[in-house]
Image (tube, rainbow, N blue to C red):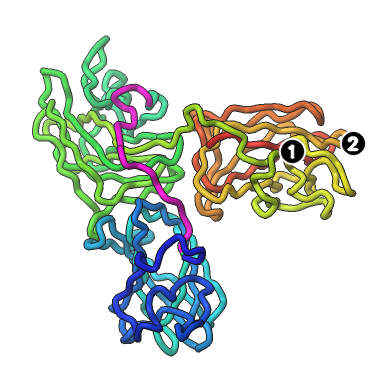
Amino acid sequence: MRNGLISDSQISASSQWDSNHSPSNSRLFYAPHNGRTGAWSSKTNDVNQWLQIHFKRLTAIVGVSTQGRAGLTQFVKSYTLSYSQDGSTFQSYTSNGLLKVFTGNSDTDTVVDHSLPTAIIAKYIRVHPKTWHGHISMRVEFNGCYIDCTKPGKLGLENGRIRDRQVRASSNYDSNHRAQNGRLNFIAHNGRTGAWSAKYNNVNQWLEVDLEQLVVITGICTQGRADSCCNQFVKTYIISYSMDGVVFQAYKEQNQVKVFSGNTNQLLMVHHDFSSPILARYIRIQPKTWNGHISLRMDLFGCYKDCDHDTKDLGMRSGNIQVSQITASSQWDSNHGPKNARLFFTARNGRSGAWSTRPNNLNQWLQIDFKGQTVVVGISTQGREDAGSQWVTTYMLYYSINGVSFFPYKNVGQVKVFNGNTDKHSVVHNVISPPIVARYIRLEPKSWNGHISLRVEFYGC
């Protein structure tokens, strides 16, 4: 909005006071000029007004910022959000199952930021003012990234890209009916049955896939149990999803939990495309009705973001990552700041040869803002180049898409502790597999020699 990448033609509204108060004035920090006012202002003051942005591409929206009208005491005090894939059917943004009402502004110029705990995946977004001061007038910006998933494919249950360790269930009838049988077109062999089958037949059962990174999920395909002995299949189900594997949210359409039609026999596949793609790491299928017994095979459709052969240094050493993108929990003083944390940085002009924290404790971190969703597949570290013997011996990584909610990096379901350095000059490289897909990454030292001091580079695309 502010930088003009969203053109005027992409911004519309329910109404405008006149052409000088048009929705194209609604860009954050927009100032009055050439007769145009310092905000979008509606024609009427009622709760049916809205401001709409058409992103033209599938977009993950993780935050929103608002201001009032520059030059006149008018602002929106509270608002809701809705979103759409086609510009016709809109769904309200909810939190914990309830319509989310955002606190807006209390003056004309202060920027009020909100992060979205659950990203909105959409092409259109609307802001709906609910209360206001003086008149409905506002300026706005959205934070997020464009998603390239124009040719979704199977995510890997059928072809084995999704490993057995990534699939689990609420229960298994026994080890021969285990969750790992729940792959599309899986057939019975070596005593294993032709589907995942739950131990119990109730609505609390689920089959879960950990995709091990944030993935755009656009659809699902299901089958029943392949064995000739047993006419078993899931007739209806719901889907829930999560970033962290702890807090799950039900998939909704038209503001209602979507109940998907499943199978009507054992073998035929039933495919559904999601009207609103899901951005998540974990996804659960929860059967609601079934024939004979809860038994299921499935695959998911969507897009991974892979580096393939395009892996490169992400910019710490080269300077492509700017000083403003590197922050830390603390610094010993301005000469030991996070801008010194670049791989192979050397002491100069009074600056020390690494980032060094103020205290030595487990609450310290170094953070990089890549300024967009990035695939991180590797990391290299060094200790402090100059005085003393200072380096980090072990560390953990955390990642975030919005800079607010951070998740620990895990491997095989366990938080990964990386081995760091054993001296101050040698470079120690660690592969990040599965990769991290995020905008923000934090390195948290867990043990160190002498003092927490660090230089680093990240690799990816």
Which mark sits nearer the N-terminus, 1 or 2?
A: 2
Viewed as shown, does residue 73 lie left or right of 23? right
Task: Locate residue 136, reporting x and y percent.
Answer: 39, 83
Q: Is residue 157 above or below residue 137?
A: above
| Residue beneath disc 1 | 455
Q: Position of residue 268 (x, y in %)?
A: 12, 29
Element type at mark 2: loop
Q: CA distance from mark 1 to mark 2?
A: 15 Å
**119 in the magenta segment:** no
**Closer to the camera in the image, 317 or 196:** 317
Residue lying at 46% horizontally and 65% vertically, measured from the top left: 1
Residue at 24% from the left image edge and 26% from the top image edge = 184
The answer to whether 261 is drawn above or below residue 459 in the figure is: below
Seen as rendered, the residue at the extreme top is 190
Judge from the rendering whether residue 18 lies leftward or rightward of residue 270; answer left or right. right
Q: Which residues are magenta?
A: 142-161
- Front one among 228 and 427: 427
On the question of residue 358 being in view, the answer is: no
Q: Main secondary structure of the magenta part?
A: loop
Q: Residue at left 44%, top 77%? A: 138
Q: Position of residue 111 (x, y in %)?
A: 55, 72
Q: What number is the disc on residue 397?
A: none
Q: Which x, y percent locates residue 197?
A: 24, 27
Observer-side mark, 1 or 2, equals 1
- Disc 1 crowd rating (10 Å Cα; few below 14, some 14-19, many 20+) is many
Which residue is tagged 2?
A: 388
Query: Callout 1: helix, strand or loop?
Result: strand
Q: Amino acid at mark 1?
A: Arg
Q: Quadrant of residue 409?
A: top right
Residue type highlighted by circle 2 = Gly
